[in-house]
């Protein structure tokens, strides 16, 4: 797992180094002794997440590693309790300089009830306030996030957020795809070829062009995810990229994907999503999650996906 990266208001997020292991953060409770994480804490953070995230045991370490390797421009931190019983990841939004995010909160089950979760959130709020945040969100901070919000099955986390004055302002879904289903695309590829459209797996030399296409058509967040993806496919006609789909920017997740206006109605999206899911199946996965879904009907019809994980997004203003 990558080491925890050093963060401050003026240092680049790509620097690797140790933080002061003895400096406790201002505004925290003495009982918790909350401090910024150091590189040597990386294994412990994965263990905390593994113990606390009971609905994500298989992915907990990867989620921590993902949050610890965000885009280079991100201002972020990981705060831990003295006994390494709890951790909170926090980051500033790149789109809204007034918004801070609580990206992940985890407390070992045996340490719950002592107020550690509350103290970690308070410390994270102080850290975000010091960097100019006037609002804090229990919500995903694209493009590098664990979930869209608080999974409703983590009832204790939702209760904590509401007890601290956070208000629910949105809801999001993940869909699940059973990868044992039919993911064939041979007939579709033949039909598209007759229209002059071909579909390719992204080779190393293609990444820059695909990323530029994604940023131009959608946004820089999706472009970063496409660059980070374990697998990516794209459709092209006469040298013009028409659509893309990616998977693996977050553990076992499919997405993002999109088709340019010139390609809509051709069935390009169906081929791209099925190609990616088949690739995920080839790695040994039995199911995949489609994260933070917009078009429910498209995925339900194309690959039999069903809405399964529900997330509440919370926010509150900072005085």
Image: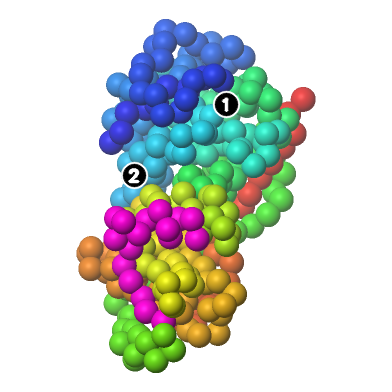
Look at the image and tell me whether residue 83 can be seen: no
Is 180 positioned to the left or the right of 272 in the image?
left
* Residue 145 against residue 195 in the figure, above or below: above
* Sequence order check, earlier mark of 1 and 2: 2
| Residue sitting at x 37%, y 87% | 193
Look at the image and tell me whether residue 30 can be seen: yes
Q: Residue 92: image x %, image y %?
A: 59, 33
Q: Residue 126: image x %, image y %?
A: 63, 21
In the rendered structure, which segment of residues is drawn in magenta? 197-213
Q: Residue 99: image x %, image y %?
A: 67, 36
Q: Nearer the viewer, residue 67 or 185?
A: 185
User: Element type at marker 2?
Assistant: helix
Residue 62 - label: 2
* Residue 161 against residue 43 in the figure, above or below: below
| Residue sitting at x 46%, y 69% | 241
Residue 124 - label: 1
Q: Quadrant of residue 295?
A: bottom right
């Amino acid at each position: 797992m990558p080491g925890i990266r050093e963060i401050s208001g003026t240092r680049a997020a790509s620097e690797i180094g140790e933080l002061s292991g003895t400096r406790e953060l201002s505004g925290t409770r003495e009982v918790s002794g909350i401090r910024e994480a150091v590189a040597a804490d990386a294994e412990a953070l994965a263990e905390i997440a593994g113990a606390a995230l009971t609905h994500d045991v298989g992915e907990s370490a990867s989620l921590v590693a993902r949050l610890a390797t965000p885009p280079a421009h991100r201002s972020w931190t990981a705060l831990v309790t003295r006994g390494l019983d709890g951790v909170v990841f926090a980051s500033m939004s790149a789109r809204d300089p007034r918004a801070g995010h609580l990206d992940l909160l985890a407390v070992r089950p045996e340490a719950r009830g002592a107020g550690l979760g509350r103290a970690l959130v308070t410390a994270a709020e102080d850290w975000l306030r010091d960097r100019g945040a006037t609002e804090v969100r229990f919500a995903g901070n694209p493009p590098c996030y664990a979930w869209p919000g608080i999974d409703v099955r983590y009832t204790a986390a939702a209760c904590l957020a509401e007890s601290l004055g956070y208000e629910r302002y949105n809801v999001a879904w993940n869909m699940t795809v059973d990868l044992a289903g039919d993911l064939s695309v041979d007939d579709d590829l033949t039909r598209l070829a007759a229209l002059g459209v071909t579909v390719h797996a992204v080779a190393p030399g293609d990444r820059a062009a695909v990323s530029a296409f994604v940023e131009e058509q959608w946004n820089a967040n999706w472009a970063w995810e496409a660059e980070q993806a374990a697998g990516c496919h794209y459709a092209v006609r006469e040298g013009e990229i028409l659509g893309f789909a990616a998977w693996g920017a977050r553990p076992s997740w499919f997405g993002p994907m999109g088709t340019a206006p010139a390609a809509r109605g051709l069935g390009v999206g169906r081929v791209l999503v099925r190609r990616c899911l088949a690739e995920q199946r080839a790695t040994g996965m039995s199911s995949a999650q489609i994260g933070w879904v917009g078009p429910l009907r498209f995925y339900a019809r194309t690959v039999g996906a069903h809405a399964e994980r529900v997330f509440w997004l919370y926010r509150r203003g900072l005085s």
